[in-house]
Amino acid sequence: MTSQSNLRHATARIAKAIDQSIQMVGHIRGHIDTLATDVQRDSLAIASESRVLADSVSHKFALTRMGVQASPRALRISAQLLAIALRYRLEEGRQQACGLGADARMKALHQSCAQSVRQLCEQQRGAFLKLGQFLSMRPDLLPAAYIRELSALRDRVPALPYEDIRAQLEAEFEGPTDSYFADIETEAVAAASLAQVHHATGLGGEKYALKVQIPEAEMQVSADIAILRAIVAALPTGSLPFDIRTTLDQIANSVHAELDYAREAEHCENLRILLRSTSGVRIPRIMGAYSSARVLTMEWMPGVPLDQALEDATTDERRLILTRLVQCFAQQIFGFGYFHADPHSGNILVHRDQAAPDGFNLVLLDFGCVERLSDEVRLAYASMLRGVFCGDQAEVRLALDNLGFAQEGNDPAALEEMVVAMIAPLQKEGALMEWARDPKAATRALIEMSVSIPGLKTPRHFVLLGRVLATLGGIIIDNADSGVSLPTLMAVALANAQPSSQR
């Protein structure tokens, strides 16, 4: 009881600190003409929600120390985000007053604020870094400056010092690391928002990759989500061009799932078995004896990241690599209904091997984000594609029903609007080729359209699958001279989409 009481006192300081900060900011804003009312309203809302944050933190955190640490963290994050919001409010007021140089000023403001958001994500890591990475793949939601800055979060995640990682390893293995490994390289091979990877050598000379969760990641993520929910609750309805609350729910679920290494190990092994007969595709074997809740040990897979391999390859080699990539994901999505849902370049390696088909293997890594489709959903996607490309509105309508597109109030108009919107672009001559030339933009527009239709609720797997296809389409567009197009993916998809009893 004493520990819980101390914890509540400590976390209550979060609310007090934020309240004091908001009050100070509110006094300053009181001098800003007509903007004062809106800004103070937002400030008071955040101050109120900070009490909800304190209660959430007290329930989620088992250690008083983390509650104490959350107070300055919450204050710092809230202050930075409020400062950005205020800059936009001031610019909007200035434009309403004079309108001079509005485009140039807003472009410069986007660039400056985007850099601040990117730096905040890098500094805070955890759920903030994951949110930045998620938004970097949604150019339909944010200005181009934000997409450019946030895209760097995939490549420039700072690694933690090895001493922190070694302490995590020893805690998980309940002893010195030399009882399990002959050597662990101190420099990280890769660093992500919630983990980093180190090369290791087993006692018998085996080569391993150690994926180590950053210390106290679960507690940090819980704190970040609580902070974000408090700030999001303060935003006026419609203040952003997308449903930030739903997006935050998706981020929270995704981040917590990525912290479950037992689940990731299971996904990795399942897909390794499913793809073991697929020529030229490899997935590392998980070493269960050297893995735990926060450490995932797998066999070392040599290779270079996909983007680097494509840059170094000849035109013919790029065509072979991309064809195999497309076929591999088409097989997962429409053949198995079980697919790697985060196929960015860092998660795909190309290993040149003379013994492999065409002289190379594709290596798939990181199975923290995997989606499973039922046979009904998998076949409904195949039916939807057939209906779209054949212009069959009835088939598309039935497929969307089967996919779980919900209509609020049972209003059929919302679903019919999406059916027409999906088919209409393909009615004009040459539309299919236009779609093939820029599938990333086409997929982005489709997702944006689906979430903008009033009364239509989009299922989670539609967004995830759209993200996968958009990512693959972007890779293909960047290598247009290879001659590979996304309609190839569609053809393979429809050919592979058979009921489970026929596979």
Image (cartoon, rainbow, N blue to C red):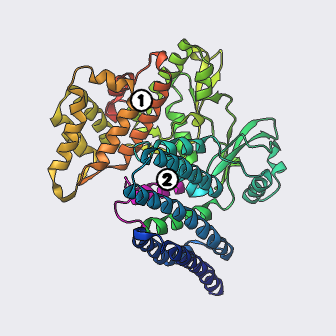
Q: Amino acid at mark 2?
A: Ser
Q: For the point 44% across and 55% down, which residue is it?
A: 250
Q: Estimate the x, y position of residue 340 in percent, counting from the top left.
A: 49, 39
Q: Amino acid at mark 1?
A: Ala
Whether 181 is among the magenta residues is: no
Under tag 1, what secondary structure?
helix
Q: Estimate the x, y position of residue 10 in percent, counting from the top left.
A: 63, 80
Q: Estimate the x, y position of residue 405 in percent, counting from the top left.
A: 26, 48
Q: Residues within 10 Å of mark 2 (few under 14, many from 20)?
A: some
- The quarter in which the C terminus is drawn is top left
Residue 330 numbered tag: 1
Under tag 2, what secondary structure?
helix
The CA distance from mark 2 to mark 1 is: 23 Å
Q: Height in image: 340 above or below 321?
A: below
- The quarter in which the N terminus is drawn is bottom right
Q: Which residues are magenta?
A: 235-256
The residue where tag 2 is placed is: 254
Whether 245 is among the magenta residues is: yes
- Residue 210 shows up from this direction: yes
Q: For the point 51% across and 43% down, which residue is it?
A: 145
Q: Height in image: 49 above or below 321?
A: below
Left/right placement of residue 448 relative to residue 295 reads left
Left/right placement of residue 79 relative to residue 464 reads right
Q: For the point 77% across and 52% down, which residue is it?
A: 161
Left/right placement of residue 324 relative to residue 68 reads left
Mark 2 near mark 1, Cβ–Cβ under 8 Å?
A: no
Discs 2/1, front: 2
Q: Relative to the observer, which residue lies in front, 3 or 122?
A: 122
Q: Residues within 10 Å of mark 1 (few under 14, many from 20)?
A: many
